[in-house]
Image (cartoon, coloured by chain):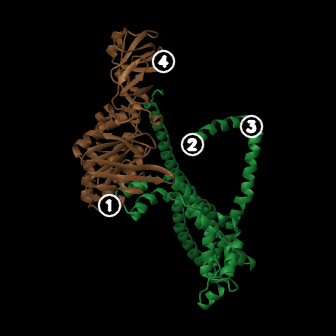
Amino acid sequence: MSITVKNVSKHFGSYRALDNVSVEIPSGSLLALLGPSGSGKTTLLRIIAGLEEPDEGAIHYQDEDATRRSARDRNVGFVFQHYALFRHMTVFENIAFGLRVRRWSRAKVNERVAELLNLIQLGGLEKRHPSQLSGGQRQRVALARALAPQPKVLLLDEPFGALDAKVRQELRHWLRRLHGDLHVTSIFVTHDQDEAFEVADKVVVMQAGRVEQAGGPMEVFEHPANAFVMRFLGNVNAFKARVQRGRAFWANMELECPDYPQDHDRPATVFIRPHELEISHSRNGVPSLEARVVHISPAGSVAKVQLLTTNLGDVLNVDLSPSTCSDLDLKTGDKVYVFPRKVRVFASDNGI
Amino acid sequence: MKPESIRLAAPARLQRRSEDPWFVKWTLILLAVTVMGLLVIVPVANVFYHALAGGLGTYWRSLVLDSDTRHSILLTLTVAPIAVAANVIFGVAAAWAIARFRFPGRTILTTLIDLPFSVSPVVVGLMFILIFGLQGTLGPWLREHGIKIVFALPGLILVTCFVTLPFVARELIPLMEAVGADEEIAALSLGANGWQMFWRITLPNIKWGMLYGVILCNARAMGEFGAVYVISGHIAGQTDTMPLRVEKLFQEYNLPGSFAVASVLTLLALVTLVVKLFLERQSRRQREEATESTDLAETSNRIDSTTYCQTTLEKQP
């Protein structure tokens, strides 16, 4: 079932949690609402679920207006950030709850719960209480409980937020596979861009109650719509620059930027991702910055090199592949030349 | 937060004990035991001794064959359950309102719930006489319609409800705040209606705390003297409850009868004590579990925001 969020606004007292938000969620897709704390992503999820009412705007389920429908009439599965499992009930009863309140027959309940226990690979633990489960197991029970009444939409609020890194990784893959099998329209909230990129078909980046950008993970990462999205998605080096007549001026470099064709001079910020920088021992005839190696951490899947530019005194973070790093044979204090393979320039908002 | 302070307090206590000389320790223990013995154990045991002094036959006769005493026991067994039921309904409603909603006057309501504890019971009785008595505000109207409240069962129930009002609510407010609304919201999202949510989720989570409040409320309802004394007019065989009966028999120099009824009340207190001990442990466990899970939630929240700060590591221009 597709979901359309139309011009939704929500205030809590004088605090504006959502400001004219519109999002399209195609049927069967897996969408991530990505943003920092306080960006309104959880509020939006709760409004879609019917746990909150919007002040303005509408929520459409398929073609029907569901804005005034209560949570229980929407047939939505909701997975809470801290699971909210019923602590006095066994795993079996937790999963069966949504079926029992809908008055399913005993035989059908048993059958459905067995099916879900199998799906979440927790067969044999149905008599345990939530307090006797690990975090990852609790999360899977919460998911099974939400899926039990066969919802048309699955909503997950920071589903892996409270888990340690390894379990989180496993559950991400598992959720992706599960979605591949079930094809239920799913929306999840996260503040972790890796999680959003790894799991979702579509990412909606939010900030301060507004949608900053929506699109596929590749599109959002490669073509960020503005400086906020650029900064929020992964590590980035940022430098002050100026733009004028389609060109940006930064240090000794001149860069093409056709987005700003205006005649007057505007302050701007140059963004370079650490993996989009190259280091060499000589100038090679390419416009480049002179820098000194401050720190090298070669451990891990990428070698992280920290440089200090000679004339600007800025710190530059560079990610190299371990093989490139060992080929360059860098040492702390070495003088090197850096040039960016890709640069993004955004004029500063306050400079207009 | 709580477990931390306990952990900090424990070593400090160990250190202090080892510093105290032996005679301080034994003097304090002796003092405490002597006071407890003289003030509590001896008088309580004495009640049973006097009640049974004339033999079991006399004891039985004073309890069962005296029709006024029989009636007083029956009356207490009527008033107390009604007061307990009213208390549970009010307690759950008030705790729900205070723990789940934010409204103007919420703090005042929380404070007012404790008021009945601080008003002298005699004054409580008087307050109701001033409202419902013949010279009272509603007195004439009530008499016209043939409704008797003062010097009758409704009055007894009213004052007993008043003096026991805070028991269940006071237990439930902190408990419900600790448990939080997460599970209730989860139940609603799974399609439960309000009743299903209350019976299947809320009630099981607060049942031990509620029972603890009920047992305290019941003990007070059965033992209440002052307020009931004023409002009942202590008419033997009509409005005398057990505590009033004890006093009346004592005034009439019927010591065996007085001590027999007193022993029943005391026995009740002892049973309450044992049940209370058990429930206290259960409800404390329930509350600790609740705070623990909320604490966990808070810590993981904190971890979330720090990891977020780390991932957005960036260089300011």
What is the chain letter for disc 1? Answer: A
**Front position in the image: B124 or A47:** A47
Q: How far, Cα to Cα, is label 4 from label 2?
A: 48 Å
The 10 Å Cα crowd at callout 4, few under 14, some 14 to 19, many 20 or more, is few
Q: Amino acid at mark 4?
A: Leu
The 10 Å Cα crowd at callout 2, few under 14, some 14 to 19, many 20 or more, is few
Q: Nearer the viewer, mark 2 or mark 1?
A: 1
Q: Residue at x 52, y 62 (%)?
A: B97
Eyeballing the image, is B154 above or below A47? below
Q: Nearer the viewer, mark 2 or mark 3?
A: 2
| Image x and y of residue B61, in percent | 63, 78
Q: In this figure, which residue is indicated by the disc labeled 3?
A: B20
Q: How far, Cα to Cα, is label 4 from label 3?
A: 68 Å
Q: Of helix, strand and loop, which one carries label 2?
A: loop
Write down which chain is painted green. B
| Image x and y of residue A305, in percent | 41, 17
Do pointers 4 and 2 mark residues of a single chain?
no
**Front position in the image: A225 or B2:** A225
Q: Residue at x 65, y 79 (%)?
A: B240
Q: Amino acid at mark 3?
A: Asp
Q: In this figure, which residue is indicated by the disc labeled 2?
A: B1
